[in-house]
Amino acid sequence: MAASTRPLYPLPCPLKQSTAPSSTPLYCNQSSSSTLINSRLVQSQRPVSVSVSFNPSGNFDISLFDDEETSKAPPPMPPTEGRYEVVIDNDIINRLDLTPFHNATGITSPESGKPKELLERSIGFTINYIREDEYDPRELSEFPDIRLWFVRLDAMYPWLPVLLDWRAGELARYAAMLVPHQMSMRMGVVFNPEALELFVMNKVFVVYTWLKENEIPMPRLKAKDMARMLGFGIGDELFDLVDKIK
């Protein structure tokens, strides 16, 4: 039985920094030809308009299609009330210090933390990054030191994406820190489609296993929802194959 993923639609993933608004959106520019393997999957039936917001001041509203007939996206969702807030700055980033994450979430090792409570409250990031050049136009995901901090965080806690504040855009920003992309004058930042697909598949496997190990209800649904947030549909065949391996 073959199983894999297929992009549902070209996904807009707006990337905004927390300290100052910017006008550069981030897109996941994908096509079905970029998929690595084939499977039977659900596909979107019509264009999708997406809006996200980033804490604390980077609220951003973006529509996938620019033509005038497309309805305007609804106002961006605010950060989830009561979420765990991880605040980092230049010093924390330069020292690759994960202490702010540990202190904010109570997660001090891969085996620690309270999964059900973490899922209910979710996690978000405030990045107080001061540029050496105040006119530097780069987005946060273009700074190697910031990306390296998130790489270390992800290496320690690879199941973290399922705990993020998805509705406030934290999953899109997290992906941008870890997935190769390039700048486009017309589209902003564009994900490498195959790199994004590999990232999503890796996280689906990791998250699904972590959810089952912690006896979280409906692990398949949660893993599917996470992938869908990044523009991919996951078939049950994939989970059937995973479950057959003891």
Image (cartoon, rainbow, N blue to C red):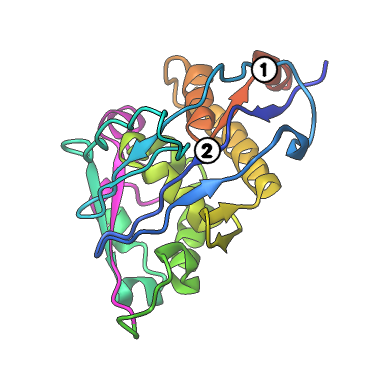
Residue 5 horizontal side relative to residue 23, left or right: right
Instruction: Locate the N terminus and report the quarter of the image it occupies.
Output: top right
Q: How far apart are marks 1 and 2 (CA)?
A: 17 Å
Q: Going 35% across and 59% down the picture, which residue do you hit? A: 23
> Residue 66, percent across and down?
45, 40
Foreground disc of the pair 1, 2: 2
> Residue 32, percent across and down?
72, 32
Q: Nearer the viewer, residue 177 or 85?
A: 177
- When asked about the image quadrant of residue 172, the answer is top left
Q: Going 22% across and 36% down the picture, which residue do you hit? A: 80
Residue 48 horizontal side relative to residue 130, left or right: right
Check residue 75 for magenta coloring.
no
Q: Going 47% across and 27% down the picture, which residue do you hit? A: 48
The outermost residue toward the front is 68
Label 2 near label 1: C-beta < 8 Å? Answer: no
Give the extent of the magenta segment.
104-131
> Residue 201, percent across and down?
64, 36
Q: Going 42% across and 50% down the picture, which residue do you hit? A: 173
Question: Which residue position holds label 1?
Answer: 41
- Number of numbered discs: 2
Q: Earlier in the sequence, mark 1 or mark 2?
A: 2
Question: Which residue position holds label 2?
Answer: 11
On screen, residue 36 above or below 92: above
Q: Nearer the viewer, residue 208 or 113?
A: 208
Q: Is residue 57 visible?
A: yes
Q: Is mark 1 on a helix, strand or loop?
A: loop
